[in-house]
Amino acid sequence: METSLLLIGLRLALSQSVGSFFAFSGSDGVKNGALAINCTLQGTARVPAFSMDGEFIIGGVFSLHYKELTKIHSYATAPEPPTSTGSINSRELRFGRAMIFAIEEINNSTELLPGIKLGYKIYDSCASVTVATHVAFQLSNGEDPVIQTGHNCSNVGVVTGVIGDSGSTQSISISRIFGPFNIPLVSHFATCACLSDKKQFPTFFRTIPSDHYQADALAKLVKHFGWTWIGTIHSDSDYGRNGMASFLEAAHREGICVEYTEAFHRTDPKSKIQRVADVIRRSTAVTIVAFIADGDIKLLFEELNQQPSSPRQWIGSEGWITDLQLMRFSFCAGAIGVAIQQSVIPGLGDFLLGLSPSEVAASSVLTDFWEEAFNCSLTKNTIAKERLCDGTEDLMTLKIPYTETSKFRITNMVYKAVYAIAHAIHNAVCQETNFTNTCKKQKGSDLIQVFTELKRVNFTQNGYHVSFDANGDPVASYDVVNWQKSGSGDIELVTVGYYDASLPKGQEFHINRNITWLDGDTQVPVSVCSESCPPGTRKVLQKGKPICCYDCIPCPEGEISNMTDSPDCIPCPGEFWPNARRDACFHKPVEFLSFDEVLSIILAVFSISGACLAIITALIFFHHRTTPIVRANNSELSFLLLFSLTLCFLCSLTFIGAPSEWSCMLRHTAFGITFVLCISCVLGKTIVVLMAFKATLPGSNVMKWFGPPQQRMTVVSVTLIQGVICIIWLVVSPPFPVKNLTTYKEKIILECALGSAVGFWAVLGYIGLLAVFCFVLAVLARKLPDNFNEAKMITFSMLIFCAVWITFIPAYVSSPGKFTVAVEIFAILASSFGLILCIFAPKCFIILFQPEKNTKKHLMNKSPM
């Protein structure tokens, strides 16, 4: 009882003080004094625009006017009554009329609230917070002029629920007033996500989705078309500020950058709207997201229409994207945005268009609307310039939001809101007995019970489901709409897709129809700060710029990027290398000295030619084995030397082809052993020459110590040492094939690793030691006084041999890849050719072309000193 008395007292105090309070209040804030609202107050009470009595009253608050006259008050005299200078907002009028239609439809129903008549009180908030607050006080205080006192503290005359307001800012103010009185407020168009806070707005519900989902839908729409560089504008109101904050948060998650964010309100000075228009004209972003009310953006479009900017792609919120009056701005053709889903309400179109003269004359709001729509006057007291309405006026000839009855969007939200309150009242006052509903016709039923039932409503009306979640919000779903030019040149609203928050993540947004873009183009406009970086490059952010502004830098050597706008390049695996575009890794080409290369063919030809030359020489020597020149040159060592030279020539072939485990071991060991065998034969021949001349001295018996058996033993022993070195090398750490990835970054070299470098250099060192020793002995024997002195030829051959292998070492170390093998083959062939040409060519020449010199007498003659 005490609580009820307190609330009644609060209502009385508020209603008594509201007149003086609003005398100095502004609309949506005070600027340069107080702003006078655009609607007329009658004393301290407002007159409803539409009303009808009933057992239960449903309130309505709509912005039937949205243009206000600004007045500066001196505070020295009483302020003038606020006046309206704007026209009727025909869309808001349609909302109010839709509420009346829904209530009349319910009153004619036999299932919902049978036997109970619903009434309504619909007020004009004038899109003003101050007026909306005044209306809220009046609705919460009731219509009775006398406050009930005594012990009967009932809520007589208080509305059961309220529909409205269209603006989030007005709805915030109204809901704060209704909260303590448990009066439910069901909005059809207040989308601010802040209203979902049940701690601040416990009795607020809405049939339109929250801006939290709209912001997500707009961000996904922008991301879907690849726009990463956008401009944003929003209303300087709770709707615009909170909606834009939600959108910017969603855009950040999607990687979208914002060039500028501008805010303004229709009550701002024209200079501010001009400044916003100038920002748009100077901007580089092609796409503009406008989270703004229709009344605000209309002023901006009018400013841009005077001096159009370069074509812009407009992205609209549901606050303005479906407003037919805005479609007269042709520069906005191609605009795309999210809108409340289309719906059909049977009978509503006829109701809206079937206004009778008596209905129009009975309402000042309808009278103003009629006169503005047809530019005539319904009263005889008219100025000369205005004609008198003659009764031929037909609403169906008008193209204004009020007459757009083919499809309903926000209007359906009003329709659903009325039915939601009606169902809540039904559940609170009606009981089903014997399959019939019995309802109590008691005015002022407990508001808490209606409020509680409203939270639980769950029904379907005309195929449209209505329910509220814990925050008082419905399931979020939107149409994606596009402004497309028709064949006649008019802009039409076309549904091209949808957004449904109830679908799984990633599937909420879908486009299912062709879209027309700015300037009628069918290609998606580009709105980026920097062009996308193609594969093969990476993004490098520009200093001091947002993350969407970057430079495209080619990937470093050995790295790739295989997707667009890659932030980093990734290195290719070891055996892979980037292609020319550096967007894919491919297997590195494998390089080795193959048999099908020109260089390999040339080396192989020389190798086989050398072997053939050695065989031919051996045949010549065998055919002339009885001649003095063959017999004088130790034919046994000569044939063994020719055999070893043949092996030397042929072992070079093992270096050609892809390395394998066996070829790697064979090529080095065969080379080492055959060359030692060759050098040991040359060494034997050199020693024989020296011993032969020593044996001619009186009393010398040297030759018996270096006869044929000793020569064979020398060759075998010297060769056997090299064989032991090779065996130890193969056992301890043999050569093996490897893939060389370091010499060339872009290709793989197949080569034989030495295994043990000590073994390799021991083999070469042993060959070099024998060659030097043989060279020294040959030098000592080079001036012996014979016409045919083989020591000279051996000296020259060893000189060539040593020169070749001395130059081989730096060439071998510095040659890359397959050329290392080629250098080794060249050294083998060069030294082998040096031996066979220096030692055997002069003898073959004498045998074949100078047989007269192939005599013992000629050979025994002393050559001149």
Image (cartoon, grey):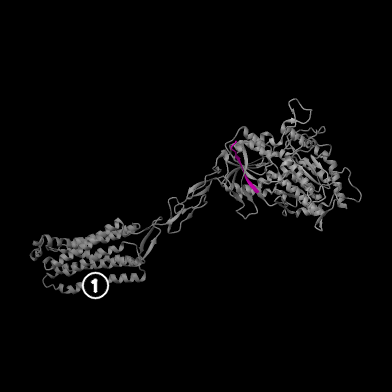
In the image, residue 368 sits, relative to residue 149, either above or below, namely: above
Dot 1 corresponds to which residue? Answer: 716
Nearer-the-camera pick, 371 or 299: 371
Q: Nearer the viewer, residue 623 or 771?
A: 623
Q: Is residue 146 magenta?
A: no
Residue density around tag 1, few if under 14, some if 14–19, many if 20 or more, within 10 Å: some
Instruction: Indicate the position of residue 376 as horizontal and vertical percent values.
Output: 74, 30
Q: Main secondary structure of the magenta part?
A: strand
Asked if residue 746 shows in the view, the reply is yes
Whole-percent x, y for residue 188 in the image? 72, 46
Tally the marks: 1
**Secondary structure under badge 1?**
helix
Q: In this view, does 411 lie to the left or right of 787?
A: right
Q: What residue type is labelled 1?
A: Val
Highlighted magenta segment, given as a residue range = 478-488
Q: In which quarter of the image is the C terminus?
A: bottom left
Using the rendered view, name the quadrant where residue 726 is placed. Answer: bottom left
Residue 768 seen in render: no
Q: Residue 80: image x %, image y %?
A: 80, 33
The image position of residue 733, as x and y in percent, is: 36, 69
- Residue at the spot 22% in from the left edge and 73% down from the top edge: 713
Q: In the rendered image of this protein, does residue 212 appear above or below residue 619?
A: above
In the image: residue 802, left or right of residue 210? left
Q: Which residue lies furthest to the right in this view?
A: 150
